[in-house]
Amino acid sequence: MGRHSDRARETLLNSAEELFALHGIDAVSNRAIAERAGTANHSAVTYHFGGREGLMRALLSRGRAEMAARRAELLDAGSAPPTLREIVTGHILPWTEHLASLPVPSWRARFLYQVASVPSGAEALRESAAQSMRLEEILPGDLPELREVSPNVLSSRARILGGMVMGICASYEGQLEQGEARGTWLSVGYFLVDAAVGLLAAPVTHPTEFVTRGSPPAFPL
């Protein structure tokens, strides 16, 4: 694929990410994305991505390889076996570092929040989840901090955690755009790590387990 085509794809991805973040997934047409990208070819999304599903797959894969490499780097630098905090840090911090690398304004966190919030994004999110390890899938069953937490409760807490991280990052991204943000993406990352460790390891205080239904969104995507 030539440089011009690569640039055209990247412009379409940036345009789609922005429009989806601002208006929602279902409210934005392929034609609107092409127009925002500055092309007169209203079939540009189909030409470059094969259609809407291909566009979504390309958007959801952005930064995935870099985050996976950073995650492995953080875990390799930790203790053996890793602690709960080290595992959670390796899962969350690459995501906030990735967001910190984007220009301001960026739209990625708000785009992903929109994807997770509508049924039309469910299939694309499930496909992306197959390429990313969910947090509960990489937590060893013998972690001392989680010995009193059943697998069902842990899975439900991970579901809550995914929504919490997406929501906070989307909110902070918007604050950055408005010039109202306090702190940095690094401080956001460590705030989320602290909150996540507390959520996952909290004692179960009632014998009847409340379990949320459905598959937790993969995070980071």
Image: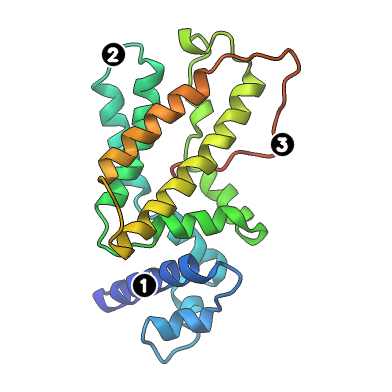
Give the residue at the far bottom of this rendering: 40
Decide if residue 135 is on the left or right side of residue 194.
Answer: right
Decide if residue 14 is on the left or right side of residue 118.
Answer: left
User: How did the renderer colour the structure?
Assistant: rainbow
Q: Is residue 212 visible?
A: yes
User: How far across and how far down the image is residue 3, in percent?
Assistant: 24, 74
- Circle 3 is placed at which residue position? 213
User: How far across and how far down the image is residue 59, in percent?
Assistant: 44, 60
Give the residue at the far right of this rendering: 208
User: How far across and how far down the image is residue 118, in percent?
Assistant: 63, 58
User: Closer to the camera, 43 or 157?
Assistant: 157
**Closer to viewer: mark 2 or mark 1:** 2
Dot 2 or dot 1, earlier in sequence: 1
* SS type, badge 1: helix
- Circle 1 is placed at which residue position? 9
Decide if residue 209 is on the left or right side of residue 60.
Answer: right
Q: Is residue 218 visible?
A: no
Packing grade of label 3 (10 A; few <14, some 14-19, many >=20) is few
* SS type, badge 2: loop
Which residue corresponds to the image point at 52% horizontal and 35% vertical from the top-left? 161
- The three-letter amino acid code for the residue at tag 1 is Arg
* SS type, badge 3: loop
Which residue corresponds to the image point at 45% horizontal and 29% vertical from the top-left? 196
Alpha carbons under labels 1 and 3: distance apart = 37 Å
The label number, if any, that marks residue 79 in the structure image: 2
Which residue corresponds to the image point at 55% horizontal and 8% vertical from the top-left? 147
Alpha carbons under labels 2 and 1: distance apart = 41 Å
Depicted 100 relative to depicted 165: above or below: below
The label number, if any, that marks residue 173 in the structure image: none
- The three-letter amino acid code for the residue at tag 3 is Arg
Q: How many numbered marks are there?
A: 3
Which residue corresponds to the image point at 26% horizontal and 63% vertical from the top-left? 104
